[in-house]
Image: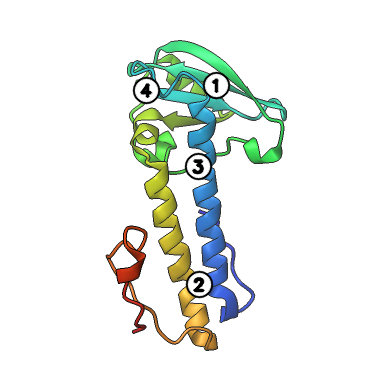
Amino acid sequence: MVDMQPPSDEFRGFDEARSIMWCYEARSRTYARLSQTDFLANDAVAAVHVENTSRADRVFLAAFDRSGGLLFGDTLYIDDPTQRLDVTPEFDHDFTGMTVAAGSELEEAVERENGWVVNLDALRDYDPLEGRRTTQRAVLLAHLGDMMASGQARGFLFDKHDAAEDPGEADTDAA
């Protein structure tokens, strides 16, 4: 997560919301880009080494099995800077506690320090829709404190009722 210190407390929620969005965008981008490959559908692939340091216009991917053996590779081209595959902590092998077999080809790739390793179990468990909903709530809550402090919001109501299913019955009273 990016930790930017705001110049004052006035926009603390804004800065927190921006950081939350950056993390969401990184998760979303990693999921979308790796979905363009055969890695997610192939159960034999346990990890993907993302070599994103040698070329600005492409990223080299190497798939590894559970024992750390190299399976196959792929290349994703980067037409726009927003397509870069930078480290995404929620999927990174270090952050997820993924075990790397000693002496394996995957361990050699990690030791080269020219990229990062995606834990495919973590990526497969990721639900993009739920990630979007969770991020939306977190961003709202980050902004809410600022808005209440400035008088832009005086109260709020959280309702478990799904207004999309029956908008006529949603409770509109503010707390």
* Cα gap from disc 4 to disc 1, whole angstroms: 13 Å
* Cα gap from disc 3 to disc 2, whole angstroms: 22 Å
Instruction: Tell me whether circle 3 and circle 2 mark residues in contact (CB < 8 Å).
Output: no
Classify 10 Å Cα crowding around label 4: few (below 14), some (14-19), many (20 and above): many
Residue at image coords 37%, 16%: 65
Q: Name the residue type under label 3.
A: Ser
Q: Name the residue type under label 1.
A: Leu
137 or 84: which is nearer to us?
Answer: 137
Query: Can residue 110 be seen by looking at this rendering?
Result: no
Determine the secondary structure under disc 1.
strand
Q: Name the residue type under label 4.
A: Ala
Residue underneath mark 1: 61
Task: Please tell me which of labels 2 and 4 falls first in the chain.
Answer: 4
Residue underneath mark 4: 46
Give residue 143's mark.
2
Quadrant (top left/top right/bottom left/bottom right) for the C terminus: bottom left
Label count reads 4
* Cα gap from disc 4 to disc 3, whole angstroms: 19 Å
Instruction: Classify residue 74 by image quadrant.
Output: top right
131 or 56: which is nearer to us?
Answer: 131
Determine the secondary structure under disc 4.
loop
For marks 2 and 1, give the one nearer the viewer. 2
Give residue 28's mark.
3
Instruction: Tell me whether circle 4 and circle 1 mark residues in contact (CB < 8 Å).
Output: no
163 or 2: which is nearer to us?
Answer: 163
